[in-house]
């Protein structure tokens, strides 16, 4: 083997050794990079899973809250419908009461809003025709002030309006029922929504 062959062999041997070192180093770096990227991918996957779990939980809570609100609103709507129905029935029953019972209710309303001065009671056309004898005289005695019936009938279906000069007390059945309806609805609203 000539000197040139030995030099070439040494160069080839050195090149192979260097190449193997580079390849080994590349494999080591590649393995470390793969390990780092795998760990990073696992962390990212876990973070995404956690975010997805959190979003799913929040979405479930929003859905549950919306369902509860819808249920409460449905219950409130139904209760309001029942209140309206019952109060309409009460109104019809009061209007259909015998004269003595009906005017006893008016008498209580008038006495509960009494002043010690002359009063005018406004009735509807129907009630003016069925007014019991001595109704105003009895009220005048109890109130110790004159009570008269307005000659002009009121435009309402039942009840009365009590007038003391510029002061009017609305005792019409519609107004009294409306007042009670609002109070009942407020109670239901508070019960269902805690307001």
Image (cartoon, rainbow, N blue to C red):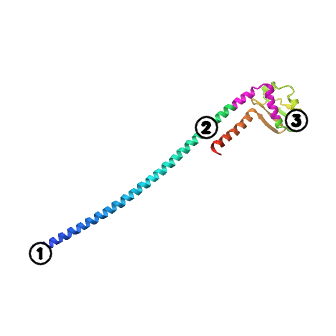
Q: Position of residue 191 (x, y in %)?
A: 65, 42
Q: CA distance from mark 3 to mark 2?
A: 46 Å
Callout 3: few (<14), some (14-19), or many (20+) C-alpha neighbours within 10 Å?
some
The correct choice, above or below, for 36 with respect to 9 in the image is: above
Among numbered discs 3 and 1, the one appearing first in the sequence: 1
Which quadrant is home to the N terminus?
bottom left
Q: Position of residue 91 (x, y in %)?
A: 72, 30
Q: Quadrant of residue 10?
A: bottom left
Please, what is the dominant secondary structure of the magenta stretch? helix
Magenta residues? 87-110
Q: Secondary structure at mark 3?
A: helix
Q: Position of residue 194 (x, y in %)?
A: 64, 45
Among numbered discs 1 and 2, the one appearing first in the sequence: 1
Horizontal side of 184 relative to 72 (left or right) equals right
Reading the image, the residue beneath label 3 is 143
Q: Is residue 10 magenta?
A: no
Reading the image, the residue beneath label 2 is 75
Horizontal side of 108 relative to 42 (left or right) equals right
Q: Is residue 96 magenta?
A: yes
Reading the image, the residue beneath label 1 is 3
Q: Secondary structure at mark 1?
A: helix
Q: CA distance from mark 3 to mark 1?
A: 146 Å
Horizontal side of 183 relative to 36 (left or right) equals right
Q: Position of residue 6 (x, y in %)?
A: 13, 73
């Amino acid at each position: 083997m000539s000197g040139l062959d030995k030099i070439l062999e040494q160069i080839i041997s050195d090149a192979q050794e260097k190449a193997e070192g580079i390849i080994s180093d590349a494999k080591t770096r590649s393995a470390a990079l793969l390990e780092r990227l795998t760990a990073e991918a696992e962390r990212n996957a876990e973070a995404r899973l956690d975010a997805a779990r959190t979003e799913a939980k929040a979405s479930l809570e929003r859905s549950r809250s919306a369902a509860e609100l819808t249920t409460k609103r449905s219950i409130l709507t139904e209760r309001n419908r029942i209140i309206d129905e019952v109060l309409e029935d009460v109104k019809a029953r009061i209007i259909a009461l015998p004269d003595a019972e009906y005017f006893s209710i008016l008498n209580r309303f008038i006495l509960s809003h009494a002043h010690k001065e002359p009063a005018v009671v406004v009735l509807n056309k129907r009630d003016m025709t069925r007014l019991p004898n001595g109704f105003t005289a009895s009220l005048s005695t109890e109130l110790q002030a004159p009570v008269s019936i307005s000659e002009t009938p009121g435009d309402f279906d039942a009840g009365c309006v009590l007038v003391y000069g510029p002061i009017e007390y609305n005792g019409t059945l519609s107004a009294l029922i409306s007042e009670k309806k609002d109070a009942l609805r407020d109670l239901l609203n508070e019960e269902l929504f805690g307001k």
